[in-house]
Image (spheres, rainbow, N blue to C red):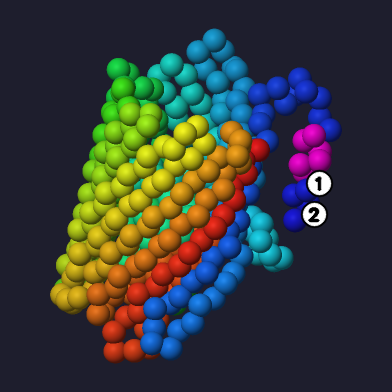
Amino acid sequence: MKYFISSIALLGALSSSVLADTILYGRLHNSIDMTDSGGDNSGTQTTVSSNSSRIGVKGSEKITDDLSAVYKVEWGLNSAENGGGLSDRNRYVGFKGDWGAVLTGRMDTPNKMIGRKVGLFSDELGDARTITAKFDGSTVSDRRADNVVAYMSPKVSGASVAVAAVLEDGQKDALGNEKTVQGYSANAVYEAGGLMVGVGHTTLDSGEVSTDRKTSSSQTTRLAAAYDTGKVKVTGLYQQDSDIAGQSGVDRDVYGVGGAVKLGHSGKIKAQYYVAGDAGEKVDNGASLIAVGYDHHLSKRTKVYAQYVQVDNDKHATYDTGGGHGDKIKADLTGTESGDPSGVSVGVIHKF
């Protein structure tokens, strides 16, 4: 941490001409969460959670009239307690022009970006990733991938596309065997007049040998839409996951809807409901999420909020609450049926 702080101090000491196109930015997001894991013997816990708090630098350098170098380095940090250090978030370097941008590094997949466009509780306790991003402990779709080469098109008449190739990463499994992960992700988005419609797809090769129970790849396809009048916003998402975590035949469908209504200049009430169907040969392993909240902007950069969140697990489901949130509410699995975690969260977000 001390080396990181020293680096930031050094950036501040450099001349303004050198850093004219470099921006230091960040977001601190803490919440007080009162949660219950939903079991017969569970009780309420109260914690302070840091939720995707971050700091980073980004910028560009003009090379020619129609070509610029672009870069971004972002770290996750814990703004609620000691320890944990810094974690790697999006970081890339590349080039951009009127033709779009080519980036290399570690970044969100285009399919993940589609889901974020309809998120009403992003990084909060009610984040839809509780349902969309996880299944039985496996990451399904909302990935930040390593070793990415991506192309982002310019927006033309409201339409844009993004394509990313995920190259071999050389990771090893628990036995020390090489576990290459290769694949691609893409999206196509149309945005105009308050309307957003987007479709995305990700295919990842797990490096496993295909058998009756395993397959070498998993796929996720998403369709998302939103309409914002300026006063009212409605959202919807459909997601299809196939061969989750390389498990042949473990497929599921996810549906979600949401809405938000502005109250005056500073307030907003919001709610969303997401459902995951059964996956694979098992029955009763689906779940639903409902989140209801109120946001209040104290300024352009500071927001406070309060929300209630409930996950309803089927008998054999293991969904937690808090996908994308710092502290997760683990479902109580000690009984004959899975617990239904719930919680109340009061938080503050400050951007700089």
Q: For numbered disc 2, what is the local secondary structure?
A: helix
Please give the range of residues in magenta. Answer: 6-12
Instruction: Indicate whether residue 336 is drawn in magenta.
Output: no
Residue flagged by tag 1: what amino acid is it?
A: Ser
Q: Secondary structure at mark 1?
A: helix
Residue type at mark 2 is Lys
Q: Residue at x 81, y 30 (%)?
A: 14
Residue 204 showing in the rendered view: no
In space, the residues marked 1 and 2 are separated at their CA atoms by: 6 Å
Q: Which mark is residue 54?
A: none
Look at the image and tell me whether residue 319 can be seen. yes
Q: Is residue 7 magenta?
A: yes
From the viewer's perspective, is residue 200 above or below residue 337? above
Label the magenta part by its dominant secondary structure.
Answer: helix
Q: Which residue is mark 2?
A: 2
Give the quadrant of residue 223. top left
Q: In front: 341, or 84?
A: 341
Q: Which residue is rendered at x = 59% and y = 69% of the image?
A: 47
Residue 263: x percent and y percent? 44, 38
Q: x%, y% of residue 72?
A: 58, 37
Q: Quick check: marks 1 and 2 in contact, CB under 8 Å?
A: yes
Pointer 1 residue = 6
Q: Residues within 10 Å of mark 2 (few under 14, many from 20)?
A: few
